[in-house]
Structures are given as structure tokens and as C-alpha cells.
Image: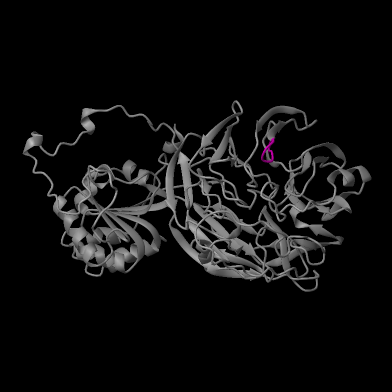
Amino acid sequence: MSVRRAYRSAIVTAVVGLVAPWAALSTQPAIGTPATADALEQAGIRRGICIVLGLPDGTGPAWLVDLAKTSELTFYFQSPSPSQVASVREAATAAGLLGSRLFADCGEFGKLHLADNTAGAVLVAAPAERQTSEAELLRVLHPEGTAFVGGRRIVKPFPKGIDPWSHVYHSPDNNPLSRDQLARAPYLTQFLADPKFCPMPEVSVAAGGRVFRAFGHIAHKANQNAMLNTLLAVNGYNGEILWRRPLHEGFMIHRNTMIATPDVLYIADDESCKLLDARTGDLQGEIVVPADVSDGPVWKWMALDGGVLYALVGREEVRPQTQSSEVAGLGHWPWGMWQGHEYKDPKTNFGFGRTFLAIDPSSRKVLWSHREEEFVDARAVAMKSGRIYFYSPQKHLACLDLASRKVAWRNASQDLLEAIGRDGPAQHWITGYATATFLKCTDRYLFFAGPQRDRMVVASTEDGRLVWQKEPGNLQLVLRDDSIYGAGPQGTVGYKLAYDTGETLATLPGRRACTRATGTVDSVFFRASGGTVRIDVADDTAKHIALMRPPCQDGVIISDGFLYWGPWMCGCQLSLYGHICLGPAGDFNFRHEPAESRLTRAAEDPAAVKPFEVRGGDWTTYLGDNARTATSHVAP
């Protein structure tokens, strides 16, 4: 079975009552359509794409226009009747909805003119019921989408083998490697959507068919201002913005304080951890750090595992000011030691804290806490298999065992601390951001590497002892089962390394600038000079996705069978702009041979076709006229 067909393999059908609300519409005129609107609302379909197949008996196009006016959905109408399509277009034009909220197309009911996994709902009128199939409805529906057919609701389930990008670096171990079994090369474009541009920093998570992106406080161009301090929830199948919320100003978001689940988005700042309804953005509750367990209310790091929310919390930090821009257009911007990025005081540094908490997210109560004497750097906190590994700069590397709630070991050996070294300044277009995480882990090893590191350092999870070290340290790591992939700095090379020894197994292309690397079951991604590099791990060859470049802080994220490139924050012009999604092509035929069956003729005798009327000012040929002047006297 192909990965595309995996989305179509299961059908969940529920009979609702004796007659569904939509079925009722096919037998009675529905002016105002309360039954249809109610059915969509009950199915949780508020924003997104709704397909309408034909007009119900006894209704006209005004019914569909009224439905569009009373909802936030985008409607796609399809019918084999040219006159019916024309009437819908005329009514939508008169209402100012055509081409924005309502689209109409001519086509048979048996073959819908939308891509796979696009629609959240399909309304099938009685005349169309016998001419379409459940398989075709399931093809266009995305998971959790609902088709209303006669007296039934057909709900598309999630396919097996998908993996969420629940934490900022995929999971609490900070290893940006997706285990998604469907997101495999080759790819097809799923959507290109707004917003096109965003400020920095940006952090993203995804789960349940939704992508959540938090945009920070620095705009280098005017086209980024609209998204300053903004949280977006986006439909992961069609790019529709589901909801947005303002973020608390003065909090550096580039850290591990956002977690996605299918039902709840956890997002924390210097006041509390907010629990947001993933579908609506409504605030379900807040978790506030108790004053008696911590020296401050600020959330530095957090992870969700086994139904328990773990957090590092602590003192107030540097509060960076929002920086808007009046600089128009595109192009580069100046790097610098922006406010708070110098990490000069552990008492006020971004992400430095001393108290670990274990919290029950259901009751929002603290289960237990652990206090450290030294400040812990949240950029160097990773969690796996019931252990939290943490680093206090130039003091020690330690392990907190979650079962015993005690420190399992603490390593302050001189060889380890000298190997890790002091933080480099970063904040350069080749090295990257000072705020980036630089500790990752597996069950056996801890890995220090990133923009601030002079060398890559590997320590044992057993006791923190130094295992090996290697220059350079500015590697963007993806920890695969068989080996370590490291995207090297611009002008150098990357590496495929052996876990136990650090031996170079293969050299890889160097990355372009600062963007982080991420991976899937068959690929590793990072930024190329133009576009995206995809390392095919089957043979370690480099492929080129030319049209878009991964955004700076996120790279390519992978969730629910799809790959996502975020809005553009960089100044480089060599990219498509916007929120871009690719999906698995599976058995798609990229090279269709010409076939007579695909040719549509307007008339058997082409000479009998009336020519188009040509009027003065028409652009009838290449560059406007036979002299190729590329000019027009027609005023826009």
C-alpha cells in the first residue's frame, strides 16, 4: 500500500439519528440553513474548506451564499451542470464572495477537483449521492474531516504510522528526528499559504493535524510587523489559519516552552503555562509556579512525558523589547548582540533556572520539585527514558532520575568541563543564534554541539564521563539509529559519525548559514545555498529541493505525514515565501504520457469556432505587440 493510500484505507461511518441535518436539506427548502450550519458546528468544523456537491432540491444559489455568509468556512462548489455552476458564481459575485470565500467549478460528482487531504467537510446533496463514492470522499477529506451523505456521517480517521512534532525539537531529547512512517520522498506540494513573512525568533510544534507557530519580538522588515508576538494555529492539511492569539510581550520565546497534543497546546512564559484548546485557541486553564517552591515564576524549559509535565522554572529574566521595522522590501539585515543574547548574568539570562517541577496537567498541581544550588542552562536540558540531563555552565553535568526524584550522578571532572568549554558568542550568520539548544541525548550518550560550541563533545549517560570530542562544535545534529548526521558550517563539510568513537563514516555537504538540521525516516534536511538539501540516508547522496529554504530557527518540521517550511524571516531572496507544506507522492505518476482521452475538444471542426473578439489595448502576443515593446497604453 502506498503512503498516499494509507490516508484512504480506513472508513468510520456513523448513523446519526434517523435523518441527518444535511439529508433534511435535500427534501425541504432551507432558507438560512440552520440545520446545515448546526451540523457543521456539531462536527467541529468552523474554519477550513467545505466541499458542496450540487444544490439540494428546492434550493438555489442563495442558499449556498447564505451559508458562506454565516460561517467562517471557505466553500468549494462542484456540479456537472454548467447552468448551476454559473448561477452559483453569479450569486457569489453579487455577494462579493467569489474567489475568496466561495469557489464554483464544473465537474462530475464522481471525481472531485481538489487534492488529497484538503477538505474538512463534504456536503453531498441528494442528486449527487449515487454518483460519488465513499473512497472519493475520503480521498479529499483530511483526517477528522466529515462527509454528510444522506443519513450518514463518514469521518476520516488518522492513518497509522504518523508521528507528531510535539516539542520544539520534536521530543524532549532535543533530537529533531521524526519517526513518521508516511512522510517519505518523493513529495508533492500540499499547500502554499499565508503568512508569507514573520519576525524572529520562531518556534513551532505540531500534532493532531494542526501546526502551531509562535512568532517573536524582532522584525527586520516591515512585512514582518503583522506577526510580532503572535501565536498561530494552522490546519496542517490546507494551510488555513484556524485561530491566532497575542503572545505576552517581553518574553524570549526561543526555548522549549511549547508542547502540542491533539487536544491541548501548552505554551508557557514568564507568568504561567497556558493550556489552550488546540482546535479553538480558547484558554482552558493556567499553571502558575507556586511561590514556595521556586525563586521565580518564569518558565525556562518544559517537557511532557507519560502524562506528566516537567519544567525548569526560576527568576525573572531580561525582558527584550519588541522591535518593529519600517524598512520596506526584502534583502539582508544586520546581525548583532541583541538584547539579552550576550548571556552575561546567570541570574537574569534567558532560560537559566534552579528548580525542576513535576506537574499533573489535569489537576495543575505540583507533584514534586527538585532544587539545584547552581543555575541550570535550559539550552542544555534534555530528557529521555525517565531521566533529565542538565548542565550548569562550567560547574557540572548532572542527571535527575524521575523515579527516585534524586540526582543519579553529577560530573564535575576537569576533562569534561574543559572539553565543553565556555560559550561562544554565536549571533553570526554562519554560526547561528545564541538562544539555540546545544544538548541532545540518546539512551547511551549526551551530545554538546551548536552555535555556541567550539567543539562537539560526547558524554556517557551512565555517569557523565567524557567519551570523545571533535572539532568543529558548530554542527547541527540529527541522531539517527545507525549514526550521527552533522550539518557543518558554511564553507566546510558535514559529517556522518560513528556513535562510539566519533569516526567519520562519510562527509556531507556543508549547510548554508545558520538554519538547523532535521530528519525523517529516509532523509536529513538543512539549508542549501539556494533551497533545501535533502540527504537521502539510503546512500548519503544530496538531493536538492530548489524552491524554498528552511526558516532560520525551525528548519523543516515533520508531522502527521507531512513536511512544513515556515514563513520567511530571513533576508535572503532565494526562496518561495509563505507557509509551505509537502506531502508524500507515493505512486503518483510524475510523467504522464499524452493521451487522447485527456484532450477536450470544443468542436470537431476548429474552423467553426468563433474567434475571440480583439479590442484595442488587449495584450494579444508576447511582450504586447509584434515590436516586443512590452508596453501598454491602457491605464490600470
Indicate left or right for 380 with 623 as reference: right
Residue 486 is one of the magenta-drawn residues? yes
Foreground pick, 242 / 339: 339
Residue 317's spot in the image, x, y percent? 75, 68
Span of residues in magenta = 484-492
Q: Does residue 19 appear anywhere in the picture?
A: no
Outermost bottom residue:
291
Residue 156's spot in the image, x, y percent? 41, 48
Query: Which quadrant of the view contains residue 320?
Result: bottom right
Indicate left or right for 169 with 576 as reference: right
Foreground pick, 155 / 7: 7
Indicate left or right for 389 with 172 as reference: right
Q: Say above or below: 373 vs 558.
A: below
Outermost left residue:
608
Residue 502's spot in the image, x, y percent? 78, 32
Foreground pick, 141 / 520: 520
Residue 183 is one of the magenta-drawn residues? no
Quadrant the N terminus occupies: top left
Query: Which quadrant of the view contains residue 98?
Result: bottom left
Q: Does residue 458 appear anywhere in the picture?
A: yes
Residue 629's spot in the image, x, y percent? 28, 47
Outermost right residue:
414
Number of marks drawn: 0
Quadrant the C terminus occupies: bottom left
Please, which colouring scheme is shown? one colour
Query: Which quadrant of the view contains residue 215?
Result: bottom right
Indicate left or right for 553 with 464 as reference: left
